[in-house]
Amino acid sequence: MYKTSSVNLIKNGKSWQEICFTILGYIPIIITFTIFSIFITQTWQFFQEVSIFDFFTSKEWTPNYSNAQFGIIVLLSGTFLVTLISLIVAIPLGILAGIYLAEYASNKWRGILKISLESLNGIPGVVYGYFALLFLTPFLQAKFFPSLGGFNALSAGICIGILILPIIVALTEEALIYLSPELRNSGYALALTKQEVIRLILLPAIFPKVLSAITLATSVAVGETMIVSIASGQKPNLTLNPFDSIETITSFIIRVSLGTVEFDSIMFKTIFTVGFILFLATFLLNTLSYWLQNNQEKNENTNKINSTIFNNNVIQKKQDNFFYTPPVEREIVNLKSSISFPRIILDRTLKVSGFLAGIVGIVFLIILLWDVGETGFHRINWTFLTSFASRRVEDSGILAGLVGSLWLFILSLIMVVPLGVGSAIYLEEYRKNNALNRFLEVSIANLAAIPTIIYGLLGLEIFVRLLKPVTGGYSILSGALVLTVMTLPTLIITSRSALKNVGKTLRQGGYAVGMTKEQVLQQLVIPRALPGIITGVLIAQIRALAETAALIGVGAKASVRFLPPLSWEGLTSSYTTLPVQIFYWLQNPREEIQSLAAAAIIVLVVILLILNLISLLIRASINN
């Protein structure tokens, strides 16, 4: 019966459902090509007015001056500096924490530490910026570096390192967990301690995946916007001194976006040109990370076979009286003859170091919540929750930000769910293994990891400029469309994972009773995958609620003193959101205004924690 229905489908061509899913599936490629075409066009126009030689060799960056200088090296040096600092923080801590979670931690501690580290991913960039500016910098000035400026690269780099830490931890832990137990057992059979097994056998085996994690983390660090915009000073400065104020590519784009940029002006073309450089850098890093991960997975089975052959050859050579010791085994032989006490100390040192690295998330969250609570909790009252922003601090509130965030949450939810789930269904159920679909996979991976400010520039050109008659320009609708495009890759990845987890048995059972592919999807697969899809939706919308940079790029206001009506007029009206309002408050040096930002952060974090808790409960119900 199944064969007959399959033959009829082939004769009649593709079903309308498959055609729809195929169209939705290729949306990420359309987005990727749109980004390329827009940025290349604006960059080409920029270099018609600015010398490409001067752009890459000049040591001055003064685009706002009458005698403008466009030396991109100034912004690149700032970007490189904060990225380097973040990697110095994140790489050792991330690898140590990943080792501890995979090799040492009990189930109880593993759960606690994983939740705390995952929570770092859900904290908005403006909150990290607040922490860097108002806690970390004063702390470093008082305890370690009296000469440290109020705005500096060091605090921004450290906070970016904490931000990217969960990426390295998660991928390192995952790589270690999925290694064959035979690797560990072979080391223990040679009387190695746990740290020797990890150092000599396990880490070399997962090196490509660790390198992939570092590459992905580097991409995120390069593209981080709000932390450097708040904490580093937004001052163009050609320096590698971490104590100095600097400006990165992303913070420059934000600084320009805070004002009104005239379309087709040299400044408009400038932000797209530096944005294109940022896009290319992160695109290459993300592609390298994706390739490393997939190449390692493809080679794992081959490596297992080669390992068996290799070991057999070693045994055979020893039986033939050849003096042969492979490099790793030679080191193991030397270790066996060493004193046991230092080896035990090293093992315990690794365990303690891993534990200390693993609790970074808990320590950071405790300090952050304590500092924010002490500064802003007294500001939270009914007036604060139900009032518009005001020049009088005691009368100022977050009503417009809350309502704006709710508007964008609902609108982006309505748009992203059919697009994301439909694209995931195509990828998991209909995709064929050809070059175009392989490029589609790479496109989704890249779109999920590129800086959000790139989406802000994309929205500025398409939704604000080209579609202004429809969207109203700088409007709620433009903001919702940007968030939809930005969160789409995340929802595609999570929904596809949910569909994959259903397994083949259920599908084959449906086909066995004569159901078509569409019937199997509608009646069996999607209902079973629904909890996982809902979790993916929540993860995507949490990201949308926490977003700041992309919305500033499409004109979110510092404050709005009205509530958009529930009409088309409301869709095309101006707006602000809670993270955007926090960012603008942090630009004000007055302590009472910064206390308002702290109070708003408390409200935002509570909302995000509730959504994260719902997501965790759904995930737990799936696992059970």
Image (spheres, rainbow, N blue to C red):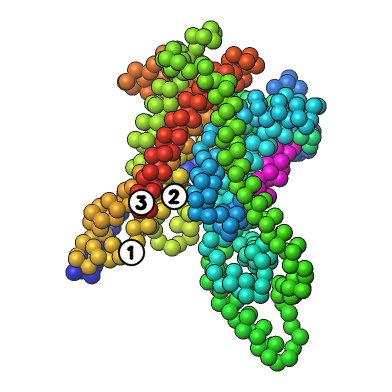
Query: In which quarter of the view is residue 99 placed?
Result: bottom right
How far apart, in angstroms, are the residues tagged by discs 1 and 2? 19 Å
Query: Residue flagged by tag 3: what amino acid is it?
Result: Ile
Query: Residue flagged by tag 2: what amino acid is it?
Result: Ile
The 10 Å Cα crowd at callout 2, few under 14, some 14 to 19, many 20 or more, is: many
Q: Is residue 478 above or below residue 94?
A: above
- Which secondary structure lies at badge 2? helix
x, y percentage for residue 220? 60, 43
x, y percentage for residue 133? 66, 26
Read off the magenta span. Answer: 77-93
Q: Is residue 549 above or below residue 507?
A: above
Mark 1 — residue?
504
x, y percentage for residue 249? 66, 34
How far apart, in angstroms, are the residues tagged by discs 1 and 3? 17 Å
Query: Residue flagged by tag 1: what amino acid is it?
Result: Lys
- Earlier-in-chain disc, 1 versus 3: 1
- Earlier-in-chain disc, 3 versus 2: 2
Residue 331 as seen in the image, left or right of residue 497: right
> Which residue corresponds to the image point at 58% horizontal and 50% vertical from the top-left?
169
Q: Assess whether mark 3 and mark 1 are in contact (beta carbons under 8 angstroms).
A: no
Q: Assess whether mark 2 and mark 1 are in contact (beta carbons under 8 angstroms).
A: no
> Which residue corresponds to the image point at 75% horizontal and 26% vertical from the top-left?
142
x, y percentage for residue 173? 56, 55
| Label at residue 493 | 2
Query: In which quarter of the view is residue 542 placed?
Result: top left
- Which secondary structure lies at badge 3? helix
Residue 131 visible (yes or no): yes
- Which secondary structure lies at badge 1? helix
> Which residue corresponds to the image point at 66% horizontal and 66% vertical from the top-left?
193
| Label at residue 622 | 3
